[in-house]
């Protein structure tokens, strides 16, 4: 697996690169956001994940994330932040990041986040047809083709959340259950994270004039109505 690290703290970058190599990953390192953005767009398909700092020389992490998503970069993006504010975390998710990790972080936590984001659960044709009629789902690109010919592209985390609902149609699923089964790591949970991801899923479906039958059950969770 090829992981791109974009981090301007040379000491942190050096130690992270060493850990990634020890775990069998192939890492590529950038210190400058603008340089990283150009490379990521020019080399789509040659890497499997991006670990992205927010405060970078050149293009900042928020802008970089938004730009590469707009250019068709679909791989998981894990955003690193030294800012301990809810607003910055939500902004990162809205820009297209799949997950966030606050500095300083433990190496074991970083590795669990990486393994979680790189996991792409298979989904059968029967499950797809039963859950969301009139769509075609490309499991490799995380792209959904609607009956009207529109194209919906989800981030890795958005796609994982959608897949979990599709595996459990007509069930009320609360936020804790989504954290346990989709995020799959122990963390101080941000109550808005699930909310933001589901909002983005709905917004992307709506942009293609295709309503997803995902209902909010006030005080209980969410349900994919089949």
Image: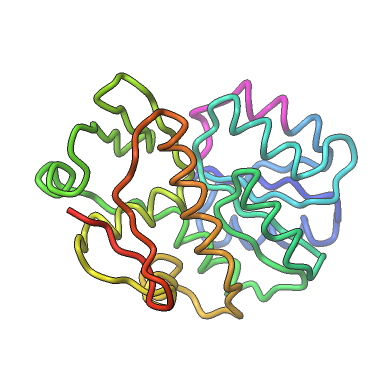
Q: Residue furthest front?
A: 218
| 146 or 55: nearer the viewer | 146
* Residue at the spot 34% in from the left edge and 52% down from the top edge: 162
| 59 or 106: nearer the viewer | 59
Horizontal and vertical percent position of residue 190: 61, 73
Quarter of the image for residue 31 reads top right
Q: Is residue 11 left or right of residue 187?
A: right
Q: Is residue 117 left or right of residue 196?
A: left
Q: Residue furthest right?
A: 57
Q: Which residues are magenta?
A: 37-48
| 18 or 177: nearer the viewer | 177
* Residue at the spot 39% in from the left edge and 63% down from the top edge: 216
The colour scheme applied to this rendered structure is rainbow
**Residue 47 is inside the magenta segment:** yes
Q: Is the residue 89 above or below the residue 159 in the image?
A: below
Horizontal and vertical percent position of residue 110: 60, 67
Horizontal and vertical percent position of residue 11: 85, 60
Q: Is residue 93 left or right of residue 25?
A: right
Horizontal and vertical percent position of residue 146: 29, 28
* Residue at the spot 58% in from the left edge and 48% down from the top edge: 77
**Residue 44 is inside the magenta segment:** yes
Q: Is the residue 215 above or below the residue 211 in the image?
A: below
| 93 or 75: nearer the viewer | 93
Quarter of the image for residue 147 reads top left
Q: Is the residue 33 above or below the residue 199 in the image?
A: above
* Residue at the spot 44% in from the left edge and 46% down from the top edge: 202
Q: How many numbered marks are there?
A: 0
């Amino acid at each position: 697996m090829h992981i791109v690290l974009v981090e301007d703290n040379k000491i942190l970058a050096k130690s992270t690169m060493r850990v990634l190599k020890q775990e069998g990953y192939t890492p590529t390192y950038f210190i400058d956001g603008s340089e990283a953005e150009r490379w990521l767009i020019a080399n789509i398909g040659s890497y499997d994940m991006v670990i992205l700092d927010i405060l970078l020389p050149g293009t900042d992490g928020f802008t970089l994330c938004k730009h590469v998503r707009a250019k068709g970069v679909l791989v998981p993006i894990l955003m690193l932040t030294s800012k301990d504010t809810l607003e910055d975390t939500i902004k990162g998710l809205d820009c297209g990041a799949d997950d966030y990790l606050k500095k300083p972080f433990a190496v074991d936590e970083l590795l669990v986040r990486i393994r979680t984001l790189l996991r792409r659960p298979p989904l059968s044709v029967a499950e797809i047809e039963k859950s969301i009629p009139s769509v075609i789902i490309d499991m490799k690109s995380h792209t959904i083709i609607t009956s009207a010919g529109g194209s919906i592209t989800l981030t890795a985390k958005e796609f994982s959340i959608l897949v979990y609902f599709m595996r459990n149609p007509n069930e009320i699923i609360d936020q804790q259950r989504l954290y346990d089964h989709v995020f799959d790591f122990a963390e101080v949970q941000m109550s808005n994270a699930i909310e933001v991801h589901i909002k983005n899923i709905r917004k992307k479906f709506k942009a293609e004039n295709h309503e997803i039958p995902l209902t909010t059950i006030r005080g209980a969770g969410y349900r994919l109505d089949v």
